[in-house]
Image (cartoon, rainbow, N blue to C red):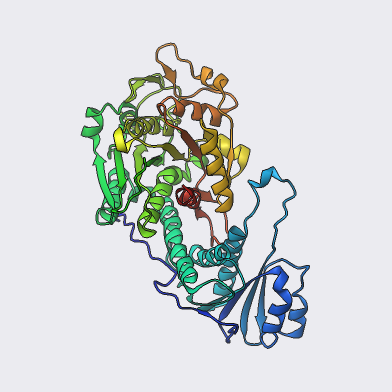
Amino acid sequence: MALSLNLKTYLPATLSITNTKNIKTLAGEFTLVVFPLKKVSQVKKALKTHLSPYQLKRLSSDNNQPQFLHGPKGYVGLLPLPEERQEIIDHEGLLDTSNYSFARDHAGALYLQAEEMGCTIAHLHGFEIEYDELLGSLLGFEIAAYDFKKQAKPLTLSASYQGELPKEALKEAHKNARAVGRATNIGRMLVDTPPGDKRPDDYAQAVNAYFKTKSGMTVSIWNDKRLLKEGMGCMMGVGQGSTQLPRLVHLRYRPSKARDIQPVAFVGKGITFDTGGLNLKGGANMRLMKKDMGGSAALVGLASWLVDSKSDFPCDIYLALAENSVDSHSFRPSDVLTARNGKTVEIDNTDAEGRLVMADALCVASEAKGKDKPQFLIDVATLTGAIKVGLGDDIGGLFSNNDDLAFILQSCSQISGDPLWRMPLMESQLSKLKSDVADIANSSSGFGGAIRAAMFLREFTGDIPWAHLDIYGWNPARQKGYRGAGGSGQAVQCLAQFISSL
């Protein structure tokens, strides 16, 4: 099956958001009311004819939990938003749940409940909420409606609003929800796609087909012959065991009204399937290795957002695509590969392959000159299991050689509800990658694997402020606004917020 990125957007292209005090509920339909907790008494009055007396009693200023109720006139979702969200542990606020992400996650979860009850029409009523809370609510519907199996028919949506936001802000929230939602869902869809349908050249051609006609975007693909000519020895070494050899895809975004500033360069790991190579993974560990291209998927999503949002920020996106297969041509432990920057790399473990393809791509990104020299270099990769052990499956590890860049990224991750936590770069871990026959080894045994991987990547970033996002990219079960296990779109929303903040 040919891979296509023409993913459906579930929010309608035009959404008439009327400024009204009337809350509409009808039999068999679903109405979600999003409101500040301090306005609970007004909401109770507005819902007096839509809920039974005992249900209205459940609405109080002490109850900030979302509720799904079957009222006399239809299904009603109540989503109260506290003014200030209190966390048990402060962490300087960098892991606090924003009202934006709270609205997004719970609106999505309530949407899925309505879908299960057979509703086909949904209505969103924003009751004196802020822009970001309306945006989060709309985005929650978009994320919840996504279904890779395409069995679910999305609910028909209308919206109303009561408050002080101008009409243009309401339209902008809808536009942004579509752009961020499509971007996130493209990242999810690529991860969910079976590995046989997204091998390196298939993946590259699908990206080219989607973006080649998009305003401001140009696409170039380096095939295996070009990779050899360009000295991409690490990429070629990893992918030489596959019948589809590696590809490097460069998405260059320069809109007609681009700001006159240096671009940001992004590099994404795109291991389309990872057997582990000759250091073969066990069956259980190999089961979900279709997601090992999650970093590249997040950046394809980001590219979609750049185009759809008409961002004026110049960006370069590099996708390092390869399949780590087992074959008579596969690279071996003890082989020595030569990276693009001339560093020689001894292979300690063929299952530490992602950092190898990233090394060559980081070299290409960091070599850009003049107006194309990046002001920041950011890589995104499903790089290590060690980071998941330390941070879980929904917090990405952030490594950086620049405090300002790290702080901006972590702040953006909190705002967007796409959390990152900064981890240390330790020179002592780099010394553990010492090789007797090459400049560096690609891995070693022992604790600190995520740090060692980051230190390895740093060797290929030049003198540019750099950040490495070690992500998981996978949602293990139904939760929040996700209807089930699958790609999570991790890092897409954080990076969109990052570009918006610059």
Question: Does residue 33 sit above or below 7 in this rendering?
Answer: below
Q: Name the quadrant of the N terminus.
A: bottom left
Question: Height in image: 107 above or below 320?
Answer: below
Which residue does the image show at 78% across and 78% down from the upper left? 57
**Residue 193 placement (x, y as % from top left):** 39, 53
Q: Quadrant of residue 359?
A: top left
| Farthest-out residue, top | 436
Is residue 28 positioned above or below 266 on the image?
Answer: below
Q: Is residue 361 visible?
A: yes
Residue nearest the viewer, comparing 373 with 379: 373
> How far from the left and from the top, in percent, is residue 267?
39, 39
**In the image, is 260 to the left or to the right of 135?**
left
- Pinpoint residue 208: horizontal percent, then vertical percent: 27, 50
Drawn side of residue 399 relative to residue 360, left or right: right
Residue 147 seen:
no
Residue located 30% across and 42% down the image: 250
How many numbered discs, if any? 0
What residue sits 32% from the left and 30% below the top?
Answer: 367
- Identified at 34% across, 57% down, the residue is 5
Name the residue nearer the viewer: 318 or 442.
318
> Which image quarter: residue 186?
bottom left
Residue 308 place in picture, x, y as percent: 37, 59
Q: Is residue 50 above or below residue 427?
A: below
